[in-house]
Amino acid sequence: MPHTLFIADLHLSPTRQDITDCFLRFMAEEAVHADALYVLGDLFEAWIGDDDHSPFHQQIKTAFATLTQQGVPVYFINGNRDFLIGKRFARETGITLLDEHTCIDLYGTPTLILHGDTLCLADADYQAFRRKVHQRWLQHVFLCLPLALRRRIAAKMRAGSASANQQKSSTIMDVTPQEVQRQLDNAGVVNMIHGHTHRPHVHQWCDQGHDYQRIVLGDWYQHGSVLVCGPQGCDLQTRDFIHH
């Protein structure tokens, strides 16, 4: 059966071998049979540059390279944790980098795909931070720093982010409905798929005679989260971790 797979928010890191194992199994056993795989951001817990060739990163890159060499196209949208994944990573893995808001034809259904952080307008502090770190000159300066220093900066930023998020209400960290509607209308579509909020759900509503659908992908903290889409529609599924 023709089908396309979507994943996001794996937050892969050497400290969570259970997530890595689930991902590698998914790539080797499931993704290999798909028409395409879309990764909608936050594949990694942090990404400090395409020149970070740690054994862990090499292992993940090999999984992507193996998949693309087997003829499965892989498309990637940067998340807020891995916005520095760039052309060298794409070249080494065979994946295709997409714009942060991209429309695709999903078996005849035009669909807007994105990471999802641009939908969370109530979190003004985060949006200000996002605008800052997406400045090209600042990224260039950061990538010129030694790897060890970049690692320390990234760790400090992650700690600060975790601390700040504990103070925020869940409403602030969720999407702004008006922005969801605006982006759908801008794209001229009625279907959206995104991650980022870690709240897997299929939202459906009607507005001015149009039926809309927004599918939110889950994170991979407790189990894998995979959206399987085919000509008949989409199904949000989970994948169990195997504990040794």
Image: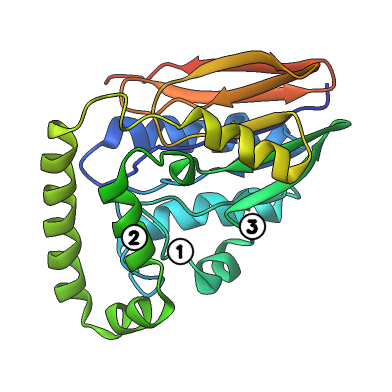
- Separation of marks 1 and 3 at Cα, in angstroms: 11 Å
- For the residue pair 231 and 127, the one nearer the viewer reads as 127
**Circle 3 sits in a helix, a strand or a loop, which is it?**
loop
- Report the colour scheme: rainbow
Q: Say what amino acid the circle numbered 2 marks.
A: Trp
- For the residue pair 104 and 232, the one nearer the viewer reads as 104
- For mark 2, what is the residue? 47
**Circle 2 sits in a helix, a strand or a loop, which is it?**
loop
- As drawn, the label of residue 238 is none
Q: Where is residue 213 in the image (x, y as percent from the top left)?
A: 67, 21
Looking at the rendered image, the disc whose residue lies closer to the viewer, 2 or 3, is 3
Q: Residue furthest front?
A: 208
Q: Residue at x 51, y 67 (%)?
A: 89
- Res 145 quadrant in image: bottom left
Q: Is residue 233 left or right of residue 49?
A: right
CA neighbours of label 1 inside 10 A, class few (<14), some (14 to 19), many (20+): many
Q: Say what amino acid the circle numbered 1 marks.
A: Ile
For the C terminus, the quadrant is: top left
> Are the residues flagged by discs 2 and 1 in contact, CB closer than 8 Å?
yes
- For mark 3, what is the residue? 98
Q: Which residue is drawn at 83% across and 21% down?
A: 1
- Nearest to N terminus: mark 1 or mark 3: 1
**Residue 137 drawn above or below residue 220:** below
Looking at the rendered image, the disc whose residue lies closer to the viewer, 1 or 3, is 3
**Residue 207 drawn above or below residue 145:** above
- Separation of marks 2 and 1 at Cα, in angstroms: 7 Å
Q: Residue at x 14, y 42 (%)?
A: 164
Q: Where is residue 101 in the image (x, y as percent from the top left)?
A: 62, 50
**Circle 1 sits in a helix, a strand or a loop, which is it?**
loop
Q: Position of residue 161 (x, y in %)?
A: 18, 47
- As drawn, the label of residue 85 is 1
